[in-house]
Image (spheres, rainbow, N blue to C red):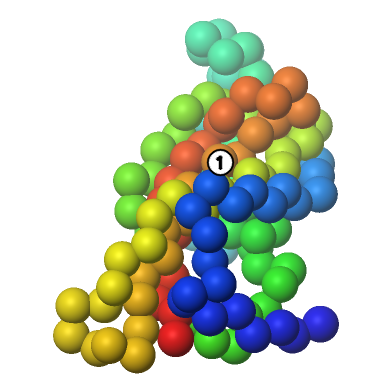
């Protein structure tokens, strides 16, 4: 369902949560093929047994992409993505981990040059099945 939400209607502190999604070996292999990132941290199970985490880890960019996609369920025709800031890969995500995203409206600012728009900053936190933050970033929206 498409619902218009205007700048004035966003409230700082509002939180929404996505459903979960389990990260699979297929996700990792497909992402490696799409990006060319075949580092052993993601692809070589035997080598990873000799490393600190003891197993393969998902690409941070994979978790970012999946997490962003998970938040895109509600389409607001009055807003568009202006970009992402302060992206950090906080903890590793392993094959079989289930992630979800918590989105909190962090800040609102008037557009400095276009009075008909404002900026909304959403704090996006990707959490694993243990409710540990594994990735964090800020999503900037330009909203009518």
Q: Does 20 sit above or below residue 133?
A: below
In the picture, measured across the screen, residue 110 lies left or right of residue 133, that is: left
Q: Farthest residue to the left: give it.
A: 113
Residue 5 on image: x %, y % = 60, 79
Residue at 56%, 31% (x, y): give it: 134
In depth, the one of 43 and 115 nearer the eye is: 115
Residue at 34%, 90% (x, y): give it: 116
Q: In which quarter of the image is residue 98?
A: top right
In the picture, measured across the screen, residue 68 lies left or right of residue 87, that is: right
Q: Does 2 sit above or below residue 108?
A: below
Residue 50 on image: x %, y % = 55, 9
Residue 43 on image: x %, y % = 61, 36
Residue 29 visible in rendering: no
* Quadrant in which the C terminus is drawn: bottom left
Residue tagged 1: 125
Residue at 75%, 51% (x, y): give it: 18
Residue 100 visible in rendering: yes
In the picture, measured across the screen, residue 94 lies left or right of residue 64, that is: right
Q: Is mark 1 on a helix, strand or loop?
A: strand
Q: Does 106 sit above or below residue 115?
A: above
Residue 141 on image: x %, y % = 43, 70
In depth, the one of 92 and 20 nearer the eye is: 20
Residue at 80%, 44% (x, y): give it: 20
Q: Does 60 sit above or below residue 33?
A: above
In depth, the one of 62 and 26 nearer the eye is: 62
In depth, the one of 66 and 142 nearer the eye is: 142
Q: Residues within 10 Å of mark 1 (few under 14, many from 20)?
A: many
Counting the numbered discs, the total is: 1
Q: In which quarter of the image is residue 1?
A: bottom right
């Amino acid at each position: 369902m498409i619902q218009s939400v205007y700048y004035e209607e966003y409230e700082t502190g509002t939180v929404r949560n996505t459903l979960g999604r389990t990260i699979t070996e297929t996700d990792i292999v497909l992402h490696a093929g799409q990006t060319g990132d075949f580092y052993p941290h993601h692809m070589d199970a035997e080598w990873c047994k000799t490393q600190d985490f003891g197993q393969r880890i998902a690409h941070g960019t994979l978790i970012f992409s999946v997490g962003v996609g998970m938040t895109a369920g509600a389409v607001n025709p009055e807003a568009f993505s202006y970009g992402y800031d302060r992206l950090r890969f906080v903890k590793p995500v392993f094959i079989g981990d289930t992630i979800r995203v918590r989105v909190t409206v962090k800040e609102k600012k008037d557009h400095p040059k276009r009075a008909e728009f404002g900026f909304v900053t959403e704090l996006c936190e990707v959490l694993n099945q243990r409710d540990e933050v594994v990735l964090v970033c800020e999503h900037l929206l330009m909203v009518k």
